Amino acid sequence: MTSWIDIAALDDVPQRGARMIKTALGCVAVFRTAEDEVFALDNACPHRAGPLAEGIVHGKSVTCPLHNWVFSLETGEAQGADEGRVATYPARVESGRILLDRTFLQARSAA
Amino acid sequence: MTQKLIVIGAGMATGRMLEHLFDAGADYDVTLFNAEPRGNYNRIMLSPVLSGDKTYAEIVTHDDTWYAAQGVTCRFGERIATIDRAAKTATAQNGDVLPYDKLVFGTGSNPFMIPLPGHDLEGVIAYRDLEDTTRMMDLGPANKCVVIGGGLLGLEAAAGMAARGVDVTVVHIMGHLMERQLDEAAGYLLRRALIDKGITVKCAANSKEILGENGHVRALLLDDGTELPCDLLVMAVGIRPNVQLAQDTGLAVGKGIHVDDQMLTSDADVLAVGECVEHNGAIFGLVAPLYDQAKVAAQTLMGEQAQFVQKEISTKLKVTGCDLFSAGDFADGEGREDIVFRDPARGVYRRLVIENNIVLGAVMYGDTADSNWFFGLIRDKTDIADMRDTLIFGPAYQGGTPLDPLAAVAALPRDAEICGCNGICKGQIEDAIAAGASDLGAIKATTKASASCGTCTGLVEQVLAVTLGDDFVLPAAASICGCTDMTHEDVRRMIKSQRLTSMPAVWQECGWKTPDGCHVCRPALNFYLLADWPLEYRDDPQSRFINERKHANIQKDGTYSVVPRMWGGITTPDELRAIADAADKYMVPTVKVTGGQRIDLLGVKSEDLPDIWADLNAAGMVSGHAYSKGLRTVKTCVGTDHCRFGTQDSTGLGIQLEKELWGAWTPHKLKLGVSGCPRNCAEATCKDIGVICVDSGYQISIGGAAGMDVRETELLIQVPTEQEAINVIKAVTQLYRENAKYLDRIYKWMAKVGLDWIKERVAAEGDALVDRFELSQTIYRKDPWAEHVTQQAERYKPLANLSLEAAE
Ligand SMILES: Cc1cc2nc3c(=O)[nH]c(=O)nc-3n(C[C@H](O)[C@H](O)[C@H](O)COP(=O)(O)OP(=O)(O)OC[C@H]3O[C@@H](n4cnc5c(N)ncnc54)[C@H](O)[C@@H]3O)c2cc1C
Ligand code: SF4
Ligand code: FES
């Protein structure tokens, strides 16, 4: 069952940008694409824990700022020849507000 | 039940074996020991690391995450000391006793050190691991190095160091270089190419003694009495399988550890792979066969039937600008004939060794495009009787009429190796194309083919052309990235001639293949647009690398470093107090003086950035742009103010230059230096732009570097007054901004356009360039910190904090 919570206004996140939110189990990055879709992913890159919220967002991907691994915002999978995956969480936009799913965020395993 | 597997050595062979094992879903509890204090990396890429083309991080093949995901227990920096095969236990150096069900030896080889007198002096090293590579990289330009051994490894070591400005001499005992792979003629061409790179080559030179001083190497003494002074001596004369442990364990050992076709040693629970093994009398020194062994070993461990078969192997030299290929056997012999082709003007040489209409060996220098085809003939023992007349000209000339050169590539089998560095064969590239990769960038990204030394780039493009047909146009020059086929230069031209003043306009008019570019092209376009249209274009922070977006340097743990400007390197007690206070208040762990005479506060948390900047701003300081592709620092000496040699006020000029140039974005970082006299205490001649003050005025020189490349500046002009000096510097900076490719430092740009062209442009349109520079500065010379503190501080905070929420 989903339980959506209101996180912030869509405009609080720049287009082709991201912001980070803190949770008890670590940080989650909220991305906004040029098309105003939003995605929520773990903020730590599986390579060396680079902060994905600081990466360059292009198409539906983000490039990690530390060593340029590219991740799909939709699946969290590393693109190209790199291998790895970031956890993704349900996110959506409703009347200009960003909504995330609380149960999902809480169910995040610490592993 | 899960079985225990102990692997000794985290090398290229065992790394590949573990991959196969886990890919196949094997149920093993693996403990991996490695004498080196690190996990698996691509050893053959140490040469690009040495030459500066790669970093160590880029050649790591398995990282902590991978080991963790596979549940491998890593014991790096630890050796296995003894093994008890009866009890099936291995004892680590620290005394831990570990039981095993299966054990794999992958101990590689030991570099062979000639026992010359003095071989144990400090500064005598081999070329085998990262430590050796770092020793060579740390040598620094203008130092001297002698490399003993003119084989593959020695030459890569020499070329790598020469690329870093080290004065290198190669000493080789044989009459020509790489005698095991090349014949004399090819050896001669190679030698000439190395000499052109500034390397001294001495063949037929016998080393007699290594001379030392205070326990450190000083010179190499040859038989004929010649002394070659050196600060480092690298021995690259061969390797010996590392079999000591296996021998102590009582395994059957000859030159290497004896293994059968299943990679089993004389003990059925112990396997061995890699350079430490001996198979049917052969030992191995290149990765291709080791990868085959790794696969077989994994299958054996899975209980599957598999057999290791020795195959022909080929060699390439990973030295930029030396196109060299050798495969098979080319020794003289009864009944053997050669076909030789030479083109001295082009420096091309080819030789084939044939017996009974079968090609046994091939050597190629200068033009190796057809090497795969010849290698295929050797490996498949093709009968060449029908094409003997035209054989030497390559695949394009077979079958009477000249074939399309692409036909040769088309004819390659799927398992023909295309990229030697990464072991990628044609089939893998075809698969990547079938999965949607349609240009070189995409192939690199999805298969890593041509992503290493790059000698196979042409071949990869041909595979693309053959597979995609008309959809693929062989590119003339490298495009910016996978989003476009256009080069940087093309795009800059389009931006100017078509008046493209926004990023979407560029994407549209230049036919970008992605909706909004990528992390490679967007920062470049952002720079081009703001440099060309300072008034119309609005800077796009989302197309900037994080350092520029946040105006601080991101560090490896996600914290930032902050560097305030100190004009010309001058500061005051008040500024120092403010910096010290800020360091205390924000608990800055490290305060460091930078190479450019500024103070770096390292380890600041992202959220604290606006506050620490606000404090520094309040004390009158502004951003030092230490993160930017823009003006960083102007380093100065003390000049006439204090120095008895000073001819002009170098500090004052440095301050003025920094005040006029700061905030200007440039294609790459821009560093200046101003010295008060030719003693050059500010090291101005290795800066992008350097000024040496002399009695009669100011010598302005450009194109220095002291990073990955080390270069001395070249004189642009000498002018009599300070104001003229400032104007020339602004003009050349603007010319660089308007013309250079993004991420080219001045010296790279200068190598493309030529110093003479720069001189002409500065002379012809100096005033106009200065005007355009000034115009841009009216917009961009501002303190980004102040702006962010007042308008964007919110953005540095978390969007929301749910940590309490989740804890309920
Ligand atoms: C600079 C350089 C360039 C090269 N270039 C090429 C090239 O272009 N093409 C090519 O095909 N090949 C090249 N080679 C050769 C290639 O790297 C080797 O053939 C390959 O790495 C051998 O793999 P391996 O797994 O057998 O051993 P290695 O990769 O050497 O690994 C063996 C590991 O075992 C560890 N070890 C040893 N004893 C113990 C012990 N008792 N306990 C625990 N650990 C132990 C060692 O520390 C080492 O890390 C190059 C080699 C070098 C050094
Ligand atoms: S460069 Fe010349 S003027 Fe400047 S400090 Fe050195 S000696 Fe003095
Ligand atoms: S930490 Fe993300 S790519 Fe290295």
Image (spheres, rainbow, N blue to C red):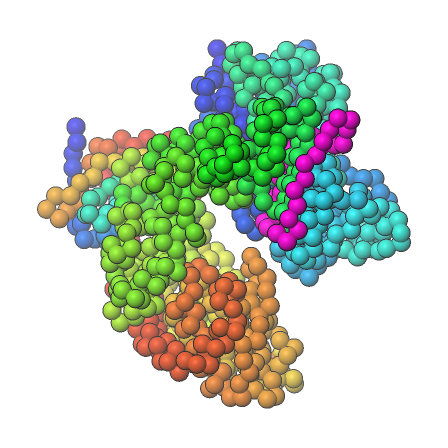
* Ligand 2 found in image quarter: bottom right
Query: Which residues are drawn in magenta?
Result: B318-346
- Residue at image coords 49%, 73%: B757
Q: Quadrant of residue B631?
A: bottom left
- Residue at image coords 70%, 39%: B182
Position of residue A22 in the picture relative to residue B76 (left or right): left
B336 within the magenta span: yes
Position of residue B353 in the picture relative to residue B577 (left or right): right
- Residue at image coords 45%, 19%: B24
How many tags in the picture? 0
Residue A82 x %, y %: 42, 37
Q: Quadrant of residue B434?
A: top left
Q: Quadrant of residue B470?
A: top left
**Quarter of the picture holding the C terminus of chain B:** top left
* Residue sitting at the far front: B400
Of B394 and B183, nearer the camera is B394
Residue B722 x %, y %: 50, 86
Of B562 and B347, nearer the camera is B347
Q: Is residue B180 above or below residue B29?
A: below
Q: Is residue B41 above or below residue B275?
A: below
Position of residue B620 in the picture relative to residue B13 (left or right): left
Q: Is residue B745 above or below residue B636?
A: above
Q: Is residue B344 visible?
A: yes
Position of residue B745 in the picture relative to residue B90 (left or right): left
